Amino acid sequence: MTRTTARNGARSSTRTIVLRAIMLTVLALAATFALDPFRNYQLAVVAATFCATAGLTLLVGLTGQLSLGHGVLMAAGGYGYALVAGPAADAGLGGVGRFALGIAGALVLSAVVGGLLGLAGARLRGPYLAGLTLALVIALPAVATQVPGLGKDQGLGVPFEAVPAPLAGVMVVEQWHAWIAIVVAAVAVTPLVVLRSGPAGLRMRATHGDEVAARLAGISPARVKVTAFVASSVSAGLGGAVLAVVAQNVGPGRYSLAFSLLLLVAVVVGGLGSVGGAAVGAALVVLLPWLVDTVVSGAGMPADLEQRLSGNLAVAVFGALLVAVTVAWPGGLAGATAGPRARLARRRRPAPAPVLDPDTDPAQEPTSDPQPLTER
């Protein structure tokens, strides 16, 4: 009976998560009609980055596996898409079929890379795993240059995804790419939310808390870590595929060490383990450098000073933001909003009904009037 109740509860929770994801996706798609082409382009990049930050916050926040090279997993997705979609385009395949094949290539390559890293993560801990992922992101340019078929420093071209004919009269290509990014982000992140809220999420938290106790409870920490790494890698790979579609190119220069570190800073600022915080962090990664560059360009500085500040000032602002958020809210921006949300939920919750003690039931108590009835 208890298992049946738990299974029904898990199904209800999954149904709620999926319905919420569908509602948010429809709202995001509708919002693209209110944005200009450049804002839609930014929205597409934010959605692609969200795929990576959502996977990273699950990996670090729930299992404690520190990855400093998550950009490599995005690169794996981008290269996987290009290696499949390019030949498909040469063979004359287009439209949804070519896009689906490219996404399949991104899923396979990112899952393979993530599985290998997960197997290493099951044996390595703390700084050793971080050092491995750091070495991978540093070695990415050399690998792309030496491996045949990866396009060297210029990268690989990606087939252009044009607006379908039925929608060509109502939207431009930037909005169509934003639609692609939003739908792919929903497909990538929703399973992570289901995983986080289900039994798999409990096993991840147990492994993070105490591996010995997890083993005594019948949990395999190695299997949990590999599962988390593969899930995180697939989500990041889908984000890399979307970036490849938007930029029509995938190359090692886009997935630098600085970009990978910014992804980690983003999930720390947003709040480790929080998918909503990962969305906020993704928006910061994309919009904050653009905002800083806009302010610098409009400040009327000398050209040489503006050139020195370009890019470097955004990193400094990220560092200052990280310090400020960590000092003010150690749980990130998600932790800052958790308190008000909890208080609001308590206010909305109906007050419990008073419990009467049968020994003090008013119906059983004598009247408080000491005078007998005959004197009234």
Image (spheres, grey):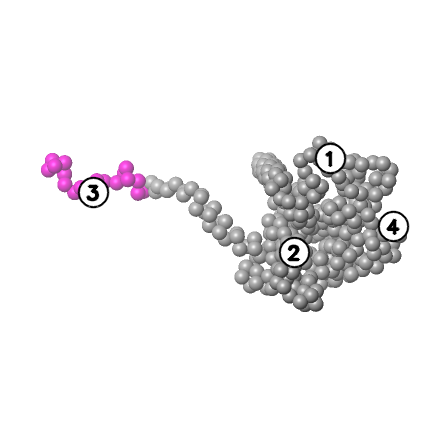
| Residue positioned most to the top | 166
For badge 1, the amino acid type reads Pro
Q: Which mark is residue 164?
A: 1
Residue at 86% x, 40% y: name it.
90
For badge 3, the amino acid type reads Ser
The residue under label 4 is: 149
Q: Position of residue 64 (x, y in %)?
A: 66, 56
Q: Earlier in the sequence, mark 3 or mark 4?
A: 4
Q: Which mark is residue 290?
A: 2
Residue at 20% x, 42% y: name it.
368
Which dot, 3 or 4, sits closer to the camera? Answer: 4
Q: Earlier in the sequence, mark 2 or mark 4?
A: 4
Which dot, 2 or 4, sits closer to the camera? Answer: 2
Q: Position of residue 344 (x, y in %)?
A: 46, 48
C-alpha separation, residue under disc 1 versus residue under disc 3: 84 Å
Q: Which residues are magenta?
A: 359-376
Q: Nearer the viewer, residue 348 or 367?
A: 348
The residue under label 3 is: 368
Q: Earlier in the sequence, mark 1 or mark 4?
A: 4
Say few, some or many: other residues with alpha carbon within 10 Å of mark 4 (under 14 / 14 to 19 / 20 or more).
few
Q: Nearer the viewer, residue 330 or 365?
A: 330
Q: Earlier in the sequence, mark 2 or mark 1?
A: 1
Which dot, 3 or 2, sits closer to the camera? Answer: 2
Q: Under tag 3, what secondary structure?
A: loop
Q: Under tag 1, what secondary structure?
A: loop
- Image position of 227 with respect to 296: above or below: above
C-alpha separation, residue under disc 2 versus residue under disc 4: 33 Å
For badge 4, the amino acid type reads Gly
Say few, some or many: other residues with alpha carbon within 10 Å of mark 2 (under 14 / 14 to 19 / 20 or more).
some
Residue 267 in view of the camera: no
Say few, some or many: other residues with alpha carbon within 10 Å of mark 3 (under 14 / 14 to 19 / 20 or more).
few
